[in-house]
Image: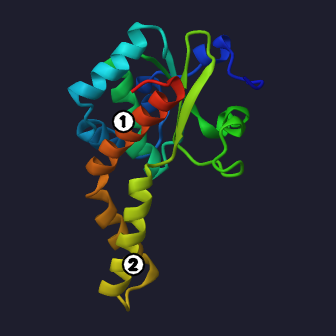
Amino acid sequence: GKATVVTPARFAQGLSYKDFLGQAKVNLDQFEANYKSAQVSANDAAFFKGLAASGRVSKMLVIGEDWCPDVYRGMPVAVKVAEASGIEIRIFPRDKNLDIMTEFLNQGQFQSIPVAVFYTKDVRHIAHWTERPAFANAERVQITDQAKKDLPSASEQDFRAEVRKRTTVRYPVWQQETVKEIRQLVARALGTS
């Protein structure tokens, strides 16, 4: 694989989820609510558990920041996957770890978060997932368009608040899609299903 700053020693310096929350300054209630709503089905848990048990996937690195809605929705999903499977998880705040972020830029240029990176035991890259599921991207467009129709004369602030309200109710579904996408990505990378 290509050169990486993520050595076993560097990986070990990452935070546990508890420690990440301990240093977070905002949105702790959001992290908690989204951790509660994130579900990993028995079938998905068995899939990831099997990979962890066979040693094919041993570690997950997550890049995130506490202020980002995609992070407080998506990171708890990654944490639940790790907990369900026994994959070791370490969290790296993006802005203090830009060298890691640079390896996983979205479309080669955007510092999109969260990123969940899957590794072998000796930290060889298997696959990584970025930001939000395709399903959520499609729904965001529909929600925004519909809100424009419903609130033609709203202020920018009221419009944003309405879009946020409508997207937030979709979070549990988007979380399910996140698990599905992560599973597909990892399966494809490993040539398994």
Q: Quadrant of the C terminus?
A: top left
Tell me if residue 61 can be seen.
no
For marks 1 and 2, the one nearer the N-term is: 1
Instruction: Bin the neighbour count of mark 1 within 10 Å (Cα to Cα): few under 14, some 14-19, many 20 and up.
Output: many
Q: Amino acid at mark 2?
A: Asp
**Foreground pick, 33 / 180:** 180
User: Which secondary structure, mark 2?
Assistant: helix
Q: Quadrant of the N terminus?
A: top right
Whether residue 115 is situated above or below residue 152 in the rendered picture:
above
Place residue 46 in its image quadrant: top left
Position of residue 167 measured from the top left corner of the image (x, y, whole percent): 33, 62
- Residue at the outermost left position: 42
Q: Which mark is residue 77?
A: 1
Name the residue carrying label 2.
Answer: 145
* Residue drawn at 51 percent across, 41 percent down: 114
Q: Amino acid at mark 1?
A: Val
Whether residue 119 is situated above or below residue 38 in the rendered picture:
above
Position of residue 33 measured from the top left corner of the image (x, y, whole percent): 27, 42
| Cα distance in 3D space between marks 1 and 2 | 27 Å
Position of residue 142 measured from the top left corner of the image (x, y, whole percent): 37, 71
Left or right placement of residue 134 versus residue 4 in this view: left
**Foreground pick, 191 / 134:** 191
